[in-house]
Amino acid sequence: MSFDLSVWALADGATPEDVRAAVQRCRQGVHADRRPDPRVVAFYRAITATYPDRPAGADTPWEVAPLHAAGDHVEMNLDPACEDQVLLDIERLAGEHGLMLYDAQDGSVYPPPARLPG
């Protein structure tokens, strides 16, 4: 069973509830017909530069490849035995690109560090 995370490019001021609602729409197959958000594109390029998903190598952290990428998010199904560094890299890159991180295991949403109250 995979460990699932996704990163989301929502408008400034988006709340954890907004992210959860977007996740539900995605699960129902409802995706906004929009151009890819540059933050999502940059995140995808950065994470797959380190951990390729096309093709996924034998040492890939991905349980499912290629990654599910849409205009406003990237979903990552990770091998539960993947190195902690992969999770740290995902968290760091999400913050660098201003994306909100959704943990499907418990529904937690983590805003990028810049959005945290100081």
Image: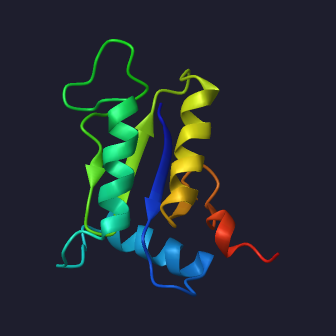
What is the x, y in percent for residue 37?
30, 71
> Which is more toward the observer, 44 or 70?
44
Q: How far from the left and from the top, in percent, is residue 22?
A: 42, 74
Looking at the image, the residue that sits furthest to the top is: 58
Q: Residue furthest bottom?
A: 13
Residue 26, position as x, y percentages in the image? 33, 67
Residue sitting nearer the eye, 111 or 104? 111
Q: Quadrant of residue 28?
A: bottom left
Q: Is residue 114 left or right of residue 70?
A: right
Say which residue appears at 33% left-offset and 69% top-offset.
72
Q: What count of labels does the image hold?
A: 0
Tell me which residue sits at (47%, 30%) in the image: 1
Residue 71 location in percent, x, y? Answer: 26, 68
Q: Residue at x 65, y 54 (%)?
A: 106
**Residue lying at 28% horizontally and 17% vertically, measured from the top left:** 57
Q: How is the image coloured?
A: rainbow
Q: Quadrant of the C terminus?
A: bottom right
Q: Quadrant of residue 50?
A: top left
Q: Is residue 60 left or right of residue 103?
A: left
**Relative to 63, 32 lies left or right:** left
